[in-house]
Amino acid sequence: SGRSNPGGFLIEQRRLEKQPADLRVGAFTEITLKPTAAGGTAQASRCTDCGVPFCQNACPLQNNIPDWLALSADGDLREAWRVASATSTMPEICGRICPQDRLCEGACTLQQSGWDGVTIGSVEAWIADTAFDNGWVEPIRPLAERGQSVAIVGSGPAGLAAADRLRSEGYAVTVYDRHDRAGGLLTYGIPGFKLEKRIVQRRIDRLVEGGVEFVLNTNVGVDVTMDELRSRHDAVLLAMGVYQARTLGVPGRGPNDTVAALDFLIAQNRVDCGDAADASAPHAAGRDVVVVGGGDTAMDCVRTAIRQGANSVVCLYRRDRDNMPGSAREVQNAEEEGVRFEWLGAPKALMSKGDTVTAVRAQRMALTEASAGGRRDIAPVAGSDFDLPADLVIEALGFEPEAFAEQLDAGLGLTKWNTLQVARGGFATTLPGVFAAGDAVRGASLVVWAVRDGQDAAAEIDRYLRARTEEAAA
Ligand code: FAD
Ligand code: SF4
């Protein structure tokens, strides 16, 4: 960017202020306070413009971080927004929920050289929120209609990102989703205290206003077949995510003894979206809750349970804090809010009295010596059983793909992990004119990767449809 700011690191790093834990556990709203203009500018100006944008390389979207930080430091937020929105269709969402410590911020030169890194994510969200507040977010207005249409199956971040790019190119876009609301895990997975529903809704509204059609409550493969979609549209993008929840294989687990993490989260997210509470939905009020698992989903469950007024909340995870898949920042938030972590504890059995679960029997695990590959494994410690009292056990053990080929089309090639098979370096499935993106291809991943895939798949579909138009004209 040609600018140099060697003294930036002398400005103190300030993370966005969080509401005190005792206040935030009373609500499902975001826990951080919004930055002031002076605060946002000061944090942006901490970037020293080191000249080697490791941050940009570590961002799955290759966001032009040094440039929008410099523009924000100069107070030119409108131009910063133009740069930020050129590479990302959802900067305000990624800025909030990317695990920045493992991506852009972890790679920041300041962080790498022992100083506190630039708070890139919160500056990104601030730029985008300011753009929305000031009406700088342009509506989608294609230069010309192309006369071809694309079906997108799944309205999560991959589907929404692709819809944005394809509609902007002038394609008619129809997004199908089996849920009653669009947004995928942005709406029904990720809780409001990380990402408020209105932030997601504002993106969906913009797509609707730009002419994207949403066909909800429609399970593709059941309510409409793939053949129908392929004959109605010129191309199809499959962005269905992964939803087959793994379950606990322990003795004593009856069919109604546990609750699946997503069922628990969806019930609360529905209420946050404005639906009336469903008395038959799982709820943690007054209960002793054990959440099994150590990923993002587990963190969201424990923090939701606390907010619902649980009597106690324990997270049981078989590895230790340093080897958990979830974000360290979320563990800290959970601990502040009153969640207790049982690290190196693996479930062994469910204990019940009559029809009701009373405890999770667990055993202590220990880290073994590093193997040749360098990774330390875990092994149970003999005679180390202990019981965690519980009358609500939530399974947050991860997700596998559903049976895509069986559900949609037997011609869909799958990988050995049952994800959708795509051509190397691209998005084309084994069916002509059918593409795939997001978790359905990668397996459970991150929002920012889904956005990247959606955008890139849209570019590939655009090339494919242009080539078809040229063929037809020849
Ligand atoms: P999804 O968001 O899963 O969307 C798929 C959509 O397809 C859904 O709306 C579904 O209803 C629809 N669908 C599926 N099958 C059909 C069908 N047959 N017919 C019609 N519609 C169908 N990532 C982060 O980066 N940060 C986080 O903090 C974070 N927290 C998470 C918390 C939880 C609880 C979970 C479960 C995941 C979290 N993730 C997080 C991961 C992230 O949400 C996913 O990687 C991302 O949403 C994947 O996007 P996608 O568009 O591929 O799929
Ligand atoms: Fe960082 Fe995510 Fe934003 Fe990229 S999209 S700059 S990784 S917060």
Image (cartoon, rainbow, N blue to C red):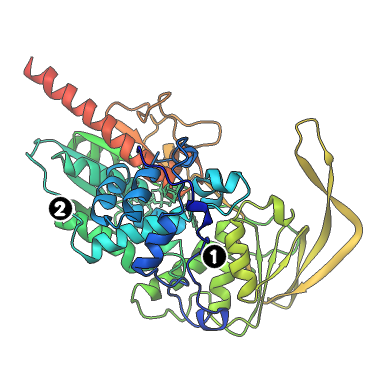
* Relative image position of residue 107 (x, y in whole percent): 54, 43
The crowding category of the residue bearing disc 2, from other C-alpha atoms within 10 Å (few below 14, some 14 to 19, many at least 20), is some
**What distance separates the C-alpha of mark 2 from that of mark 1?**
33 Å
Mark with earlier residue (2, 1): 2
In this view, 353 is above or below 98:
below
Q: Which mark is residue 300?
A: 1
Q: Amino acid at mark 2?
A: Gly
Q: Which mark is residue 210?
A: 2
In this view, 204 is above or below 220:
below
Query: Image point 35% across, 28% down: which residue?
Result: 428
The crowding category of the residue bearing disc 1, from other C-alpha atoms within 10 Å (few below 14, some 14 to 19, many at least 20), is many
Query: Image point 44% across, 40% down: which residue?
Result: 56
What kind of element bears circle 2? loop
Query: Image point 24% across, 50% down: which residue?
Result: 79
Callout 1: CB less than 8 Å from ligand 1: yes
Q: Quadrant of the N terminus?
A: top left
User: Residue 277 occupies which quadrant of the picture?
Assistant: bottom left
